[in-house]
Amino acid sequence: MTAGRAQAVVIGASAGAVEALSVILPALPEAFPLPVIVVVHVPPDRPSLMVDLFRAKCRLRVGEAEDKEPLAAGTVYFAPPDYHVLVEADKTLSLSNDEPVLFSRPAIDVLFESAADAFGTALVAIVLTGANHDGARGLKAVCDAGGIAIVQRPEGALAPAMPEAAIRTCPDALVLSLDAIAEYLKEV
């Protein structure tokens, strides 16, 4: 699949997320044609600073995902603390407080698997830095659905465990530096 058929981007990150996302998200142009849904492992017991931080850095609209919200082009949606975020078949977001996955809520796997079901071959999924294996199973679902799987180069990650697990699970994924990921997304 070529990036030109993409309809949505999903990104998962954990330890080192702010630094990694600070390379990718601000690089996206104001006219970026896709919604971007991001799961970052954040503590469940306090507000996330992700929206405020990236709203100041990005040309795209940035907000916290809300239940039943329709996806809009050129918008970055961050999963709220202590909620899984899912993409429904009608391309709306839903929030869930189901059990944590790999000790995480929000979990990357939950987002990626639901987005793979909703978008199939029209999905770009990106696993970034992190210290656990969340995202690997979800990236496999994206690969199985024919979507594009991208993984941050482990040697450039603050915490390489998550990218390494994703590569083991999806050996055909594109393995790129953060700058190369940003450039790839600009071509969608």
Image (cartoon, rainbow, N blue to C red):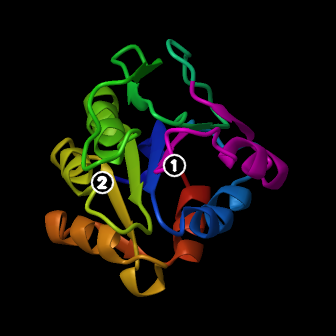
User: In the figure, is residue 58 to the left or right of 1?
Assistant: right
Could you classify mark 1 by the number of other residues whose Cα lies within 10 Å: few (under 14), some (14-19), or many (20 or more)? many
Q: Against 112, is 12 above or below?
A: below
The image quadrant that residue 170 belongs to is bottom left
**Pointer 1 residue:** 42
Magenta segment boundaries in residue numbering: 36-65
Q: Which mark is residue 135?
A: 2
**Residue at point 26% right, 37% down?**
113
Q: Amino acid under label 1?
A: Val
Query: Considering depth in this image, is 114 or 73 the residue closer to the camera?
Result: 114
State the SS at label 2: loop
Residue 40: % across, % down: 49, 50
Residue 35 in magenta?
no
Q: Label 2 near label 1: C-beta < 8 Å?
A: no
Q: Against 176, is 47 above or below?
A: above
User: Exactly how many numbered labels are in the figure?
Assistant: 2
Q: CA distance from mark 1 to mark 2?
A: 15 Å
**Residue at point 59% right, 67% down?**
183
Query: Considering depth in this image, is 18 or 143 the residue closer to the camera?
Result: 18
Residue 172: % across, % down: 21, 68
**Residue at point 36% right, 19% down?**
88
